[in-house]
Amino acid sequence: MRKADLENDPNVYDLSRRENFNEEEKALWRPAGVIPAARIEAACQAYAGGKALESPASDAPIFENRDFPGLSVVCGLLPPETQVLFTSCLMHRDLADPGHKINLQSDYQIPYPPKPTSQPLRFDSSFFLRERSAPEDSLTPYSHDKHKPLSNEQALYTKLRWLTLGEQYDWPTRSYSKHATPFPTDLSTLVTGLFPHIRPESGVVLIYSAKDFMPVHRDVSEQCQRALASFSVGCDGIFIMARGEDDGEGENAPRTVAIRVKSGDCVHLSGEARWAWHAMARTLPSTCPPHLASWPVGTPGATPAEEKAYKKWKGYMGTKRINVSCRQVWD
């Protein structure tokens, strides 16, 4: 579909515009409370190492879907400055840690940046502090018959697809391997501060470009029945969930719901919805909010030299969408 058609499609629910819903749509998406501003501010302040938010947070409304028990959307959960820090921690610090799996590791020898200093909230080890196409920063394929070398720019802009944190998800086998890295402490603090019932052990980070999508699948590899919190930053995406049988009737009748997920939103899955078929069917380019559109320009705590380096990558997040699903793996 064209982007313009999506704006007015009645089958795509944009919950940030719920006040414009008709009565039937409002009955489908029922208010289920809020996450109070005080809890959001406390969690975001702890995530930022004790630094208070520059602008006060607002209550984040929660909406549940009547036809999909356990599917809820928290609109605008992460404040703008937390979204910037969230992106910076993932794409500067966590991406530069070779202990975290990324999709390129199996095919390329990656020249990782040196280990960062232990100073909190300092992003002095990052692929984005390098030139876009310096020969010494290129990724060398293990098999030259199958792959060509990649410049730093090619790797980050067009080839990077996913990153895993904590318990390492093995994509080929759809299971968790024995290898694990510590789940980032600050991210764990943020998740549990917002959702005290979730103990995050694994984070699956998906990096989408304009034409990327995640096909229909189920998340059934975790060995527990706990809820999942899926955070989004960057461009908007169309999230789809389905239930029922093709020829089912009544409660087993086939149902599908499509949701427009925006930067700062969180999709919370529990109960039946935790195991449902779902997909990220579409990324919508040119929808990244202004506070992220120039990233890595605007990285918190950047030195003048780092700011100069980031300007060479200005606008990276303007073309990207990042989704982080934080989940408990083991009972």
Image: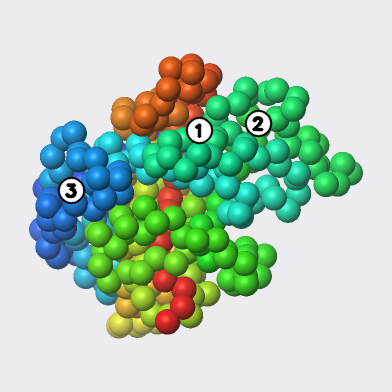
Q: Mark 1 falls on what kind of element?
A: loop
Report the label total: 3
Q: Residue furthest front?
A: 118
Give the position of the C terminus as an image quadrant.
bottom left
Identify whether 12 is placed above or below 135: below
Neighbourhood count class around disc 2 (C-alpha, 10 Å): few under 14, some 14–19, many 20 upward? many
Where residue 257 sits: x, y (%)? 33, 61
Cβ atoms under marks 3 and 1 closer than 8 Å: no
Q: Secondary structure at mark 3?
A: helix
Q: Earlier in the sequence, mark 3 or mark 1?
A: 3
x, y (%) of residue 86?
37, 44
Q: Which mark is residue 152?
A: 2
Q: What separation in Å lies between label 1 and label 2 (alpha carbons)?
A: 17 Å
- Mark 1 crowdedness (10 Å alpha carbons): few <14, some 14-19, many ≥20: many
Residue 124, label in figure: 1
Q: Can residue 207 be seen in this snapshot?
A: no
Question: In the image, what residue occupies the spot 36% across and 76% down?
Answer: 226
Report the side of 262 relative to 283 (left or right).
left
Q: Quadrant of residue 290?
A: top left
Q: Amino acid at mark 2?
A: Asn
Q: How is the image coloured?
A: rainbow
Which residue type carries mark 1?
Asp
Judge depth for marks 3 and 2 and give the one in front: 3
Lower position in the chain sequence, tag 3 or tag 2: 3
Q: Which residue is mark 3?
A: 41
